[in-house]
Amino acid sequence: MADQDCSIDGNSDFYGLGLRIGLYLTIIASWLSKLFLQEVFSSMQISTLALLLANLIALCSAARNPDADLYAVEGCVMFYLLIMQFMPAASLPKGKWMGGLDLPSALLFFLSIAFKPLWTWYWIKGVYFWKPSPCGKEYAFFFAPVNLVGGFRIFMIIIWVALSVDSARNLLIFFLLCGYKSAQNVEDNPKIMEGEREQLYRAPISFIVSVLAVELTIHFNHIEGVHSLRSTSQLIPFVAGLGQLLFVIFQLLFGDTGIEELSFPSLRGALSFAIHGALRYRH
């Protein structure tokens, strides 16, 4: 472990307590709505994708700036959080397969393809691109603290290079089949639907592991300044996530409360907050 008397001043604009808890609550709300309230989930999905896109842009911007006031291990925390944001965005497939993706599904497909090379870049170059920790060794989470630049890094490079290559293959197949293969109605394919439902039921396990990865990576590296809800920049996403969860719970308990009112304000709020907050990193 790093020196107990040493600490890192974390960047709360990227992963402060309010942002983290707000995201956790949003994921729980989305998971519940996927299982029981598909109409509510559909209205939440666009705003969730908007937040995911804004944070992906923010990471790309930081990846172009070696002078950004970020430590390499903070990049690991941010990527863990970004992975989590794909959980509430994904949905059970509906409509036509390949040839007839709806806008949210298509956007999620392309964002997932863009994310994998970026995560690969982090393990190849990013761990040396931003500042090293002043506390000595840097630790990531892999069910235990592991050296960020040790054998675990090599393992992650192999995994994510393979996934990036597979994504390129999937992208090629998508464009080839999109125009020439007749679209298939997904609801008529039991194997696809069953696989998606099984993945949905396994989501709580993935969620718990992801939360542990984020929080323990922060703990292992003695990152400070990211454990308070006092600032407005942390309070807003916390309240937004709590509001979404309470809304879903209220829908489950009492039925329809006018879900059509959720979509556009949520989208506008997610865009304005995400773009304002996620692109603010210190120079």
Image: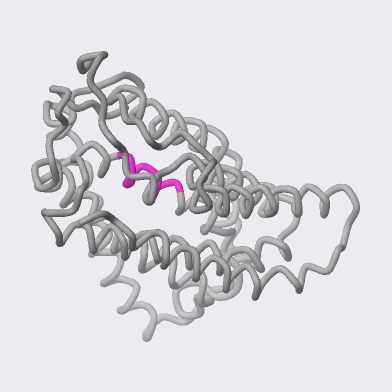
- Residue beneath the point at 38% across and 45% down: 12
Magenta: main secondary structure equals: helix
| Relative vertical location of residue 24 with respect to residue 6 in this rendering, above or below | below
Name the one closer to the observer, 282 or 185: 282
| Relative vertical location of residue 215 with respect to residue 190 in this rendering, above or below | above
Q: Quadrant of the C terminus?
A: bottom left
- Residue beneath the point at 28% across and 63% down: 114
Residue 216, image x and y in percent?
A: 38, 25
Q: Quadrant of residue 71?
A: top left
- Residue beneath the point at 36% across and 68% down: 110
Q: Quadrant of residue 77?
A: top left
Name the one closer to the observer, 256 or 67: 67
| Relative vertical location of residue 218 with respect to residue 283 in this rendering, above or below | above
* Magenta highlight on residue 116: no
Residue 269, image x and y in percent?
A: 57, 68
Residue 166, image x and y in percent?
A: 25, 56
Q: Quadrant of residue 108?
A: bottom left
Residue 76 lies left or right of residue 131; in this view the side is right
Residue 256 lies left or right of residue 197; in this view the side is right
Residue 187, image x and y in percent?
A: 63, 65
Give the magenta part as a residue range: 77-84
